[in-house]
Amino acid sequence: MKQAVSIAIGADHHGFAQKYYLTTLWKQNEYAINWYDVGSFDDKPSDYPVYARAACEMIRKKEVDYGVLLCGSGVGMAIMANRYCGVYAGVAWNTDVARAAKRDDNINVLVLPSDFVSNEQVSQIVTTWLTTEFVGNRHAQRIAMIDHVTCKE
């Protein structure tokens, strides 16, 4: 087994059940994962920016290695997460997209569209994302270009 990774995980009411599945029921084979649950803590209607912010702050402060965010389409969470310097969030609805997003764009926040993927698909997507390596080279140069515009700290 590889070294444990720490992941902040957050979801609105749409993603609450899959967040519970990932943190409680899903058995990882490849990684030991330390989950840091930033909410929501029930399936009552909630506002996704609250949970995206909490997860991204943990990444920004280097309290966790990665983030996983879940909402209905995934788009709202990705929009919010990408407001943070050093956060690279991408929506993945299958393993091919998850692989490409990590390999080429080095996403450190995986956003899952809960209304459109099953628990089995979520398992496969997360596993693929965690086990894919960033290729760097020209892709790293592109990320540096993004940081030049967005990271004015």
Image (cartoon, rainbow, N blue to C red):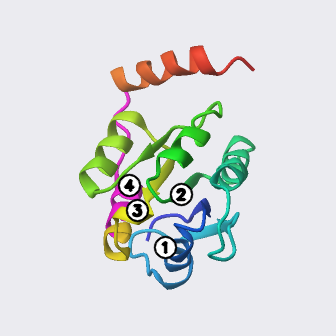
User: Which dot marks residue 107?
Assistant: none
Crowding around mark 2 (Cα neighbors within 10 Å: few <14, some 14 to 19, many 20+) is many
| Residue located beneath label 3 in the image | 126
Residue 22 x/y as whole percent: 50, 74
Nearer to me, 129 or 135: 129
Nearer to me, 4 or 15: 15
Q: How far apart are marks 2 and 3 (CA)?
A: 9 Å
The amino acid type, in three-letter code, at marker 3 is: Val
- Does residue 63 appear anywhere in the picture? no
Mark earlier in primary sequence (1, 4): 1
Q: Distance between the residues labelled 1 and 3?
A: 12 Å
Mark earlier in primary sequence (2, 4): 2
Disc 4 is placed on an element classified as helix
| Residue located beneath label 1 in the image | 18
Residue 60 x/y as whole percent: 70, 41
Pointers 4 and 3 in contact (CB under 8 A)?
yes
Segment tinted magenta in the rendering: 124-136
Question: 50 left or right of 104?
Answer: right
Q: Nearer the viewer, mark 1 or mark 4?
A: 1
User: Which dot marks residue 129?
Assistant: 4
Pointers 2 and 3 in contact (CB under 8 A)?
yes
User: Which dot marks residue 68?
Assistant: 2
Crowding around mark 1 (Cα neighbors within 10 Å: few <14, some 14 to 19, many 20+) is many
Crowding around mark 3 (Cα neighbors within 10 Å: few <14, some 14 to 19, many 20+) is many
